[in-house]
Amino acid sequence: MFLEFDEISFSYPGVLALDNISFEVERGEIVGLIGANGAGKTTAILHIIRYLNPKSGRIRMDSVDISRIKNEDFPVSYIPDTPVFYEELTLLEHLHFIKALYPDNKLSIDEIIDRLELLDHLHKVPSALSKGTKQKLMIALALLRRYELLIADEPFSGLDPKQIGVFKQILKECRQEQKAVLLSTHLLDMVDGICDRYIMLHRGKLIAIGTKQDIIQRHALGPDSTLEQVYLTLVGQEI
Amino acid sequence: MLKHFWPSFLGLLLGVAFLGYRLFVVVMGGGFGIALEPQYIFYLLCACVLLNGYRLLFKQTPAIRVNAATLHYLYHTSYFRKILSAEYLLSLIKNMLLAMLVAGFICGFQYDSLFLWNFLLLSGYLYSGILLSWIRYHVKGELRWVTIACYFFSSVGLFANIYAMRFALIGSVTVWTVYYVFFKPRNLNLVKYRKDIAFLDTNTASASQYDMVKMSQITAEHNANRKRRFLLYHLPLKKNNAIFIKCLIETIRAGSRIWIILIVFLIIGVLIYRTSILAGLPVIGDPAVATPLGVLLIMIAYANIGEILKKQLNTLLERHRLGLFLPVSHRQIFSSYILLGSLVYIVLTIFVGLLMGSKSYLTLIFFTLYSIVFAFDVFIEIRGRKFKQPIQTVLRIFSLMLGFLFVA
């Protein structure tokens, strides 16, 4: 297993955000981390990117505890739900800066500009960009890194339908390149069909894990149920 | 503005009046008719050079301004040229008045031929600064370098000992700038000018309605969309220098205002310590107070530069934690900031050392020790948790003591 998220618990003051959660992510698969707002998806991700330290449990990558991996070797690229930038740098400068830090990534700046249609915004600073363009820049920066695991937290936010298609295609290419992808969203119809497995969270608890068919069979749901119907049935909120 | 901020304006006015009076009394040796001492003439000419340098190299707004509506409706009519000529004339008058004041100081307000020559030279020099700034604002490419060359030649002319040379250098630059501006009036970069004038007009309108929120918003948007001259990828970006270059770019873009404020701190510190301009004030005028106050002001400038760099470092590390990962060790990030800080401090220390007349070996010792203090401060900022606050307070006190060593 590439990523092992092992019995992690975490609380914010007065709120249990993760209650003994365990899951694994393998190379070459796209895993959907799904749940309603406040389910604990972002908290789980913040543990994987080492922003938060678990109160109990361990997180390992390739059997190494992530706290022991050096910055230089940390194999994670991350698209946060709230875009994070260097306010003083233009879009093109962001791309050059990250490219300089990861010179061995074969993806060129021109290629990524072309693919994500960033040409008209190259000389703008982040505060002058639209929400969708900020999101595209976050995706571009994530792809310019050297990574084994791509984590995307609500990546479809602000993207137009064409760009959503482009991003889904990029995720499939990651899978072909044997990279692991952890896709977190509450927009369940967006990820229905592109993920190999799903991790369903509700109020900090793991309510289901596996392929869509596995979950449907295990909980004796209708075979044609959508992901949204599956999730809402499991949390006891039928449409 | 006056309605809301009259106490500040009054304080400012009184302060300027007092400083002007003290400057007058000190440099004039107590009255009219006495020519200025050579070192003060040198300082005055340096101030003129700095003024033109600011106009040419740092000022982002156009040197000649017309109303946005005038530009929009009258640009293609003959009226526009007349209005522009009136603005040129107004600017000439302002610069002539300034030149008259400076020439008056130089010659002790004796209206003889020496005053006339100085007045003519300074008028030419200062007005050519405005016109060079105006030309540079509108042109691209080689001509921008020509304006810098002109500034250099006219500044050299200002300090030349031979009058003929002074006239030749300043005169030729003035004639060229006047020729260029008046006989090639259609070389305006209209897109840029229109945009800037519209911004300035909107900002002025917001100011007149006391709408500070709108003013801040307009300024933030304008700064965000401003074209940057010096870009990250113009430098040889590599994995091992990327952080340093980013830090350098960020420091350059911190805004000219903060640097101007810090330089003002330094200059006031130097004035208090090295001159008797403020000697008439009740407390500051006392030499026992003037020395520590001068040192304090200088060290405030040093400390604030450190704070700017530390704030940048904290932001970078926070972004790293939030997902903008940097595949480098903390040591490399730390070294980049220390290196940039040391470079800034060495330039600053040489500058202050020259102004204060400090001994070179003391300057060197101060720079070395202050760089160590800065490095330790940055280290505490990154690593220190428990005793960060008290250690940084001790470092402040120690750096103040170093300031005394340097200045003394």
Image: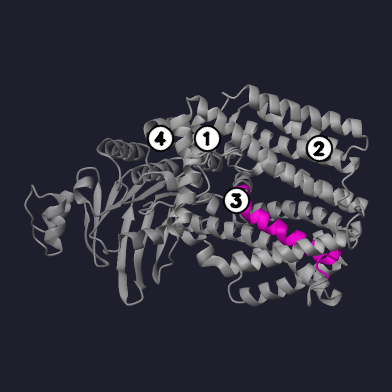
Do callouts 4 and 1 mark residues in contact (Cβ within 8 Å)? no
Measure how far apart labels 4 and 3 are at the Cα level: 27 Å
Please rate how many residues cluster around mark 1, counting C-alpha atoms within 10 Å: few if below 14, some from 14 to 19, many from 20. Answer: some
Viewer-proximal residue among B254 and A100? B254
B218 horizontally vs B134: left or right: left
Residue located beneath label 1 in the image = B193
Please, is residue B172 above or below residue A182 in the view?
above
Residue A213 coordinates in the image, percent (x, y): 15, 49
Q: Residues within 10 Å of mark 2 (few under 14, many from 20)?
A: some
Q: Give x and y (percent) for residue A29.
A: 31, 45
Determine whether label 3 and label 1 are within 8 Å by CB. Answer: no
Q: Is residue B339 visible?
A: yes
Disc 4 from disc 2: Cα separation: 55 Å
Amino acid type, label 2? Leu
| Label drawn at residue B255 | 3
For mark 4, does the 10 Å Cα neighbourhood hold few (<14), some (14 to 19), or many (20 or more) residues? some
Mark 4 residue type: Leu
| Residue A43 placement: quadrant | bottom left
Q: Are marks 4 and 2 in contact (CB under 8 Å)?
A: no
Q: Nearer the viewer, mark 4 or mark 2?
A: 2
Q: Which residue is mark 2?
A: B120
Q: Farthest residue toward the left? A: A222
Which element is circle 1 on? Answer: helix
Tell me the residue that label 4 is attached to.
A118
Name the residue located 47 percent from the left edge and 39 percent from the top edge: B68
Give the left or right position of residue B191, taking residue B131 as reference. Answer: left
Q: Quadrant of the C terminus of chain A?
A: bottom left
Under circle 3, the secondary element is loop
Q: Position of residue A69 (x, y in %)?
A: 51, 56
